Image (cartoon, helix red, strand yellow):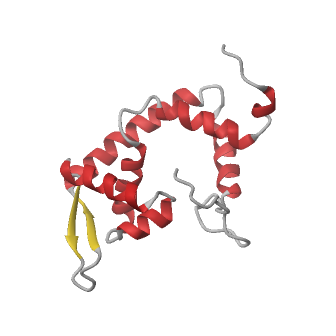
Amino acid sequence: MSYQPQGLLRIPTYVFGKLHKALYSQVNSSLREYWVLVCLEEQGDVSQQEISNGMGIDRSEVVHIIDSLESAGFVTRTRNEADRRKYRLDITDVGRAERRRVTAQIDGATERVLNRLDDDERATLHRLALKAVGYDEYLQPLPGPEFITAPGTHH
């Protein structure tokens, strides 16, 4: 096993970042594209600006992601009739199939990345991570201050 600085391993968010990187390395797809597909499938008519704000991704990067998804046939982009400055984004059937394919990859990668945890420990880890970002185990917002993100964060 490679050297890991204990000073960093004491920081929970550093450890979560390592888990994210380990999972990402095992998924054969762009996670940001996947996030957009999930968002479009759940919310339907969402603007590029709402995606940028909701996921903390720079607007110009969202444009590139949508361009890629559109060229792959996963998303359609049409002018919003009510406001011609905006686009209406819709996930296609091919996009829904891609979202399911990547979900299966993420599920398998999660199993491998969290293999040292039993089912109860995984549920606890997820519940506590949700609480840290302001949601309960039913994915409902918790009362209190908004989750704090650094200005200009581009996750």
The reply to whether residue 147 is in sight is yes
Image position, residue 16 (x, y; %)? 65, 40
Q: How many marks?
A: 0
Give the residue displayed 26% in from the left and 64% down from the top: 90
Q: Is residue 113 above or below residue 102?
A: above
Give the residue displayed 46% in from the left and 58% down from the top: 58
Give the residue displayed 38% in from the left and 59% down from the top: 60
Q: Nearer the viewer, residue 137 or 19?
A: 19
Quarter holding the N terminus is top right
- Single out the residue that lies furthest toward the top: 1
Q: Is residue 106 left or right of residue 96?
A: right
Give the residue displayed 56% in from the left and 59% down from the top: 152
Quarter where residue 89 is shown:
bottom left
Q: Nearer the viewer, residue 36 or 99?
A: 36
Image position, residue 85 (x, y; %)? 28, 78
Quarter where residue 124 is shown:
top right
Q: Is residue 84 above or below residue 18?
A: below
The reply to whether residue 121 is in sight is no
Image position, residue 136 (x, y; %)? 66, 61
- Single out the residue that lies furthest toward the bottom: 82
Image position, residue 11 (x, y; %)? 77, 39
